[in-house]
Image (cartoon, rainbow, N blue to C red):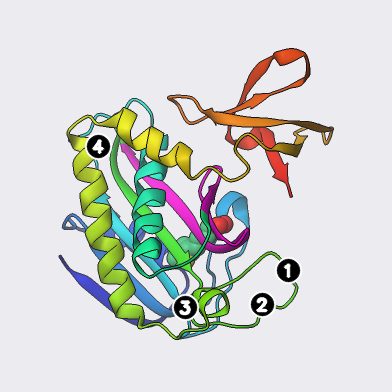
Amino acid sequence: MLIVKLNAIDSTNSYLRKLSAKEIIQDYTTVIAKEQTQGRGQMGTVWSSEASKNLTFSVFKEMSQFHLEHPFYISIVTSLALLKTLQFFSISRLSVKWPNDILSEDKKICGILIENVIKQNNINASIIGIGLNVNQTEFKNLPKASSLKIISGKVFDLDEIVHAILKNLEHYFLLLEKGQCHILKNEYEKYLFRKNKPSTFKDVEGSIFSGFIKGISQSGNLQVLLEDDITKEFDLKTIELLY
Ligand code: BTN
């Protein structure tokens, strides 16, 4: 497994994507940056992280052998690898806020940005970007953000955490390769933030409504039990959980 360490780069996801367009990259090649000047989050947002305090890295995962019907399984595998790692480091009250924000004590400690490389209508590879807040203790204007240090009071070794994440990623991708989708989906659902609790959502039109999160569908849509006992499925860009 090749690990590339950079002092500064615009974005480790962008770096790995450009590299993969130029040359053949080994499975699980990982690029870690001490600092990102243009860190990217989901849906065009910015990911900011104090230099050298946190983990900002991307993993190149070969996907052509999977013939995945539902790309959301890449999110499930990544979330589970992170949850298992964080559990190993005794991080308390872990959950996954759909689709793939990792929370501890109801605060976001980790974000995931998955970008797929498509070839002939198939996912050929995935660039899995992970931003994990580790030793940073101040998050200006981000009241819902936290870090491992804030949660546990301990300072963590960044390398030790990356190695554990990579090991767990391999483990969960192996399960996916073996077709153990139901096990992965069940485990992911066990960690779902606000599962079976009354929650408030916003849809694309900006309307606010309430319901209970019940689980996810095979394709990764969020299943919400609404009034009148109707369960509706929402796809990624159509619903936001307000909390
Ligand atoms: C999110 O929660 O919005 C996703 C954040 C993902 C951030 C990581 S940091 C490493 C990789 N490079 C990026 O530019 N983004 C991801």
Identified by mark 3, the residue type is Asn
Disc 4 is placed on an element classified as helix
For label 3, the residue is: 54
The residue positioned 34% from the left and 73% from the top of the image is 32
Tell me which segment is drawn in magenta.
95-118
Earlier-in-chain disc, 4 versus 3: 3
Q: Say which of 132 and 193 sits in front.
A: 193
For the residue with label 1, is its CB less than 8 Å from the closest atom of ligand 1? Answer: no
Where residue 68 sits in the image (x, y, percent)? 30, 30
Where residue 5 sits in the image (x, y, percent)? 29, 79
Identified by mark 2, the residue type is Phe
Where residue 130 sits in the image (x, y, percent)? 43, 62
Identified by mark 4, the residue type is Leu
For label 1, the residue is: 143
Earlier-in-chain disc, 3 versus 1: 3
Query: Eyeballing the image, is 7 above or below 114?
Result: below
Separation (CA) of disc 4 from disc 1: 35 Å
